[in-house]
Amino acid sequence: MKFTTAIAAIAGIAAATNASVTINEVLGSTASTDSEFIELYNTTGAAIDLTGWTIELWDSDVDSTGFMGSDGGAPYALSGSIAAGGYFTLANAQAQAAGFLNFTADITIGANSIENSSYTMILRDDMGALVEAVFVTDSVMDVANDGTMAITPDLTVGPDGTFLPAGFYRVGDGSSSTALLEFDQAPASATPGAANLPTPGALALLGLGGLATARRRR
Ligand SMILES: [Ca+2]
Ligand SMILES: [Ca+2]
Ligand SMILES: [Ca+2]
């Protein structure tokens, strides 16, 4: 029985993203003025200097007058560094407050930084090269874009039923599979600045002694 479980667990491991730094978790769209955060994750074994890196947010609703315009206060300039296998967070004050997600972000962004309608979030490095593009969509009249043209995103998230997802997390840091965050200003599944919830398969492996292996890899 345990052996069968292990096989299923191995089959359930998701492929990792190709990006050195990945957009690992985002909460953006719940109430009119809402908790918002963006979590980056360093998939590599070395620290990365984020000086000069940026996060862009592009309105992706074709039927909006702001289509292909920059959302909120974006682009956001990053600074500091992200440790090997570590996290870097941007969040508004509300998300960081007690009673909400109660954490301290690396960078505080303004209220309503992530529009509550479809958006394309683009991470660029200090050379302006695209590191990763994530498209969050309600699936109606939406086009992923970089502010000048339609693009093919690295990851598409949504819809949540017929709505724009509140946010998402990669199921296991850096994984290419995602799950949606609960439609809540402090989602139970949200882990800003900490490890995302693992895959059910990873959980099973941990139960079978995989934890020691996972720790050795770090
Ligand atoms: Ca929002
Ligand atoms: Ca739409
Ligand atoms: Ca997390």
Image (cartoon, grey):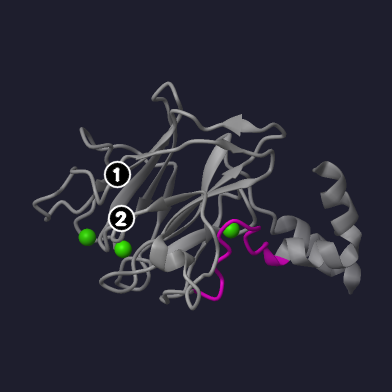
- Judged from this view, the residue extending furthest toward the left is 65
Q: Is residue 199 magenta?
A: yes
Q: Nearer the viewer, residue 146 or 151?
A: 146
Residue pictured at 64% horizontal, 40% vertical:
43
Q: In which quadrant of the rendered image does the C terminus lie?
A: top right
Residue 32 located left or right of residue 126: left
Question: Which numbered tag is attached to residue 163?
Answer: none
Mark 1 = which residue? 74
Residue pictured at 76% horizontal, 66% vertical:
203
Q: Position of residue 18 (x, y in %)?
A: 57, 36
Q: Earlier in the sequence, mark 2 or mark 1?
A: 1
Q: Position of residue 147 (x, y in %)?
A: 22, 37
Residue pictured at 25% horizontal, 38% vertical:
150
Residue pictured at 44% horizontal, 66% vertical:
95
The amino acid at mark 1 is Ala
The range drawn in magenta is 187-200
Q: In which quadrant of the rendered image does the N terminus lie?
A: bottom right
Q: Is residue 86 above or below residue 171?
A: above
> Which type of secondary structure does the marked residue at label 2 adopt?
loop
Mark 2 = which residue? 113
Q: Is mark 2 within 8 Å of ligand 1?
A: yes
